[in-house]
Image (spheres, grey):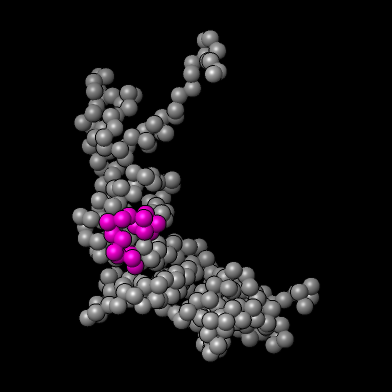
Amino acid sequence: MRSTPEGVAPLQQPFEEVFGQVILEPDRPEPDFVIGPHGKAAAKRFNVYRNNVTHSLVTALAEIFPATALILGERNFRMIARDFLRANPPRSRLVFEYGHGLPDHLAAFEPIRHLAYLPDVARLERAWLDAYHAADQAPLWPGEISAIPPEALAKTRFTPHPAMRLVRSDYAIHTIFVAHRGGPMPHRIDAGVAENVLVTRPALQVEVRRVEPSQAVFLLALGDGAPLQEAVEWAAKGDPCFDLAAAIGLLIESGAFSACQPATHDED
């Protein structure tokens, strides 16, 4: 084992690291360097601050995932949120960037395993917020597509809009999302109906719409850089009746893409 050279103080954990480790753990004592006025103990002051930090982060998660919080109920959500933040402290100073790992945390939380749809509802809520904060960019103008020569369309590639997100699920996440975020509440929701949801922000308002499975495959393929013809082939594999005209209309009307690039001579 290496020893510290004589006269050199051993390395200590940075202040921020030590402070961050205990601030979210209610059972851990305050660090030695936390003192009150005149060098007195500051346990009560520190615990008040610790409680405020926890409360603020839990409240932020409830605002990021309002439908998830409503479904769970305030008490259950706050309990799960506290458990999540202790295992996943914030890595950014921007509060809206927090909580990306909550859907996976929900999926692994055994007491709510019967709410199998809930992690995907949370993923959709996270996608909504990410779309809201995405970079501004003008959506694809229809004239850009019509200007491409017909013989070049097959190999044309599309650039996703920064706000475009697509969430696919085995559950009725769009119906549940809308019903629990101010939309109409159906008399009955069949949570077992698979739904694919496209999230976009063509202007200043986030739009959330349910799309057909083949349309989701088509948009995902384009978003991954596949040329138009290849994306059509992927969509048609699962749906021989895939409607390309309707899919192109969705692509334009939703603002899911911001540009298109015809094939170069090297790709011909």
Residue at position x 30%, y 47% in the image? 83
Q: Is residue 243 above or below residue 28?
A: below
Q: Is residue 184 above or below residue 86?
A: below
- Across and down, in percent, residue 255 comes to 50, 76
Q: Is 68 inside the magenta-drawn segment?
A: no
State the extent of the magenta-drawn residues as a range: 103-118
Q: On the picture, is 206 further left or further right than 138?
A: left
Residue at position x 24%, y 41% in the image? 51
Q: On the picture, is 142 further left or further right than 43?
A: right
Which residue is farthest right? 266
Q: Locate residue 155: give its quadrant.
A: bottom right
Q: Is residue 36 visible?
A: yes
Q: Locate residue 104: give its quadrant.
A: bottom left
Comparing 11 with 192, the one in front is: 192
Q: Is residue 208 visible?
A: no
Comparing 100 with 112, the one in front is: 112
- Across and down, in percent, residue 88 comes to 39, 46
Comparing 212 with 109, the one in front is: 109
- Across and down, in percent, residue 134 comes to 48, 63
- Quadrant where the C terminus sits is bottom right
Residue at position x 37%, y 35% in the image? 21
Comparing 49 with 108, the one in front is: 108
Q: Is residue 139 above or below residue 78?
A: below
- Across and down, in percent, residue 190 comes to 30, 78
Q: Is residue 141 above or below residue 130?
A: below
**Number of disc labels:** 0
- Quadrant where the N terminus sits is top right
